[in-house]
Amino acid sequence: MNAISLQDRSFLARRRADRLLSGSRPQTVREALAALAALSDGPYPLDEPTDMYGNRIVRTLERRTADLLGKPDAAWFPTGTMGQQAALKVWADTHGPAVAMHPLAHTEVHERRAHQVLSGLHSVPQTAAPRQPTVAELAALDEPFDVLMLELPLRDAGFVLPSWEELTALYDFAADRGVPVHLDGARLWESAPHLGRSLPEICARAGSVYVSFYKSLGGHSGAVVAGDEEFVRRIKLWRHRYGGKLWQQWPAVLSALAGLDNELPRLPDYVAHAKVVAAALAEAPGAWINPAPPHTHQFQLWLPHPAERLAEAGLRQAEEQGVSLFGGWREPGPQPGVAMTEVAVTAAALEWTPKEITEAMAGFLALL
């Protein structure tokens, strides 16, 4: 008999746990299908024919997202990677191929540099610091750039956001130089509380905005890129060329609409409680929270222990005590034996008090 894989063991442990602190309970295919079927009683256009190549329910989601972001129109993409490529390609056609982006940007770290390999663009590093760039740093760049891309929040730096004043200054800088701004807003939905502005206000001065539906809203997959009508018409052309004009996409689109209804209104509560969770976790010996306090409902937790030991302790706690605090651990820094996990405060975490978190964390560390 084959031994169970670490991935399957983790899935079973988190699924069976009585309590979860970070993330959501994983589902089987049967459970996900049942949840999708349950939406038949919701306020969705289910009695119209299924979509064909992006019409009907797809257009419903595109128009609703455009309204939420304060943009004239929007286009659905099966993946955010494809949507980012299409947006940057259109800007390159009108302004030039040099895109100023952070070295930790999703396009650089997690998309296999598709914008370079497939679209012929090249990136200009904004700053070496693990935070949002400053106007002074952009002004000091030796290499000119044609497009300014901002990832809000910057995930690999710790889900870090600028202040509203800093974002306004970046918009002013780009406008003064006639450079369009593209927002990588995969997790933009949860950024409004920290910035203190509505989504339309945050997006108003960006030429294009990408948002994801599965990273924070619980959708199955998919993304939307929003902008003016002419921009959206042109990115739809590139969507087709990149292979994103699928015959039917209604299951993913339906789950995205449900995410806008069910999860989007709860994100401010998640963001507020993330500060409570982070403060409780910071009391553990050697713990380091980044950023402190969190800017969104997600943040990094660092501990001075090897990732392998922390992962095993987490599995044991879930299996033996029915408590799952974290997901995966890794050692991304230069110092070996110091590991990091990304904590995502969602509905399950709202039930936890600081005292309960402190006690569960002590039990977790006792298993090392």
Image (cartoon, rainbow, N blue to C red):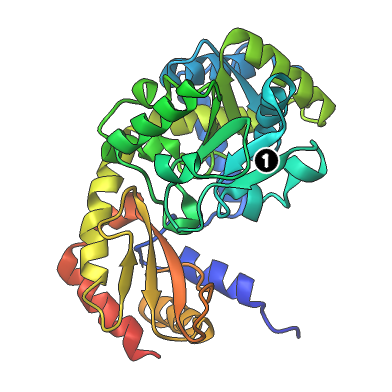
Query: Crowding near pointer 1: few (<14 within 10 Å), some, many (20+)?
Result: many
Mark 1 lies on residue:
81
Is residue 78 something that shows in the picture?
no
Quadrant of image for the C terminus: bottom left
Residue 68, horizontal then vertical, whole percent: 42, 20
Is residue 224 something that shows in the picture?
yes
Residue at point 33%, 40% (across, down): 267
Looking at this view, name the residue that lies furthest to the left. Answer: 355
Q: Nearer the viewer, residue 69 or 19?
A: 69
Residue 312, horizontal then vertical, whole percent: 50, 84
Residue 224, horizontal then vertical, whole percent: 59, 27
Per the image, label 1 sits on a secondary structure element best described as helix
Q: Nearer the viewer, residue 203 or 124?
A: 124
Q: Is residue 264 left or right of residue 237?
A: left
Badge 1 amino acid:
Thr
Q: Nearer the viewer, residue 21 or 130?
A: 130
Residue 117 appears in which quarter of the rendering?
Answer: top right
Q: Nearer the viewer, residue 265 or 3?
A: 265
- Vertical relation: 118 (above or below) 160: above
- Vertical relation: 17 (above or below) 257: below
Residue 223, horizontal then vertical, whole percent: 60, 33
Q: Is residue 262 left or right of residue 53?
A: left
- Vertical relation: 339 (above or below) 119: below
Residue at point 33%, 38% (across, down): 166
Residue 180 appears in which quarter of the rendering?
Answer: top right
Quadrant of image for the N terminus: bottom right
Q: How many badges with numbers are in the image?
A: 1
